Every structure is written in structure tokens, then in C-alpha cells.
Amino acid sequence: MKQGQYTGIIKTMPHKFIFEEYGARRFIEDFYYLPNGGDCCWFLFTMPSIPKYEVLHFYLLVDGRIRFRANIVEFRGPATYRFSRTRVISGKAWVLVGAPVVRAPFKIEMRGFRGFRYTENLW
């Protein structure tokens, strides 16, 4: 794939976080419905680094399938954020994503991986 063809990045959500810590149903409902409900809601995800190429979309891989696409609002450098009284996360880089969050219109199966991968427009 040539540099000019990248339009997004794919990130795998850890199985433990989705299914044990946050709760799969709650995460999917929060990630899909909150940003689409207004301008005030967005999500932060840790990244191993800020991508070298400018991209527009963030695809989320959950349990072996790409399930969502969101718009990238901005990338941030190293930081530590508090998400609750007990959940504090440090990251080398962060991506802020927001509306519109779109469900995948068809099955896109993919094996999970660490870090992120560049991709062309998937839908």
C-alpha cells in the first residue's frame, strides 16, 4: 500500500478490558451512542505512537471483527489520564475520536494485534 492510500488506522481493543473490566455491552453502547448523541462526547484511546501519516478514520477491532469507524479529532502526546477513582492510564500517545461513530455494514474479520495498523477506507 502506498503512503497516499492510507485513510485510517485500526486498533484492537484488549479482550480483558472489553469483556471483564468495562463490560462488552456497556462499552459498545457508550462508544456508539454517546458521541452520536451530541458534540460533547468523545473517546480517548492509548497508542504506541502518533501515526506518521495523516489519517481521518479510527477503526475499532473487537473480538475478531472490525465493528466501528469513528472520526479522528486529534492525536496527543504522552500523558496520564484518570477515568475513574481507580482507573488511571498512562500512554505514550493518545488518539481522541468522536462522531460520527458508524457500525461496520458487513463482517470484517481480522485477528487481533498489538499497536495499530494503517488501512485504506474500509467502508
Image: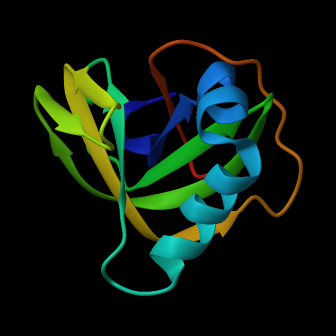
Seen as rendered, the residue at the extreme right is 107
- The answer to whether residue 10 shows anywhere in this view is yes
> How far from the left and from the top, in percent, is residue 27?
62, 51
The answer to whether residue 19 is above or below residue 90 is: below
- The answer to whether residue 122 shows anywhere in this view is no
Q: At 34% from the left edge and 48% from the top edge, which residue is drawn?
A: 55
The answer to whether residue 112 is above or below residue 69 is: above
> How far from the left and from the top, in percent, is residue 102?
64, 68
Q: At 84% from the left edge and 33% from the top edge, which residue is drawn?
A: 109
Q: At 31% from the left edge and 17% from the top edge, which residue is drawn?
A: 48
> How far from the left and from the top, in percent, is residue 5?
46, 42
> How far from the left and from the top, in percent, is residue 8?
46, 45
In the image, taking residue 100 as reference, residue 85 lies left or right, namely left
Q: At 59% from the left edge and 42% from the top edge, which residue is drawn?
A: 60
The answer to whether residue 88 is above or below residue 113 is: below
Task: Give 5 or 78, whichever is nearer the viewer.
Answer: 78
Seen as rendered, the residue at the extreme front is 85
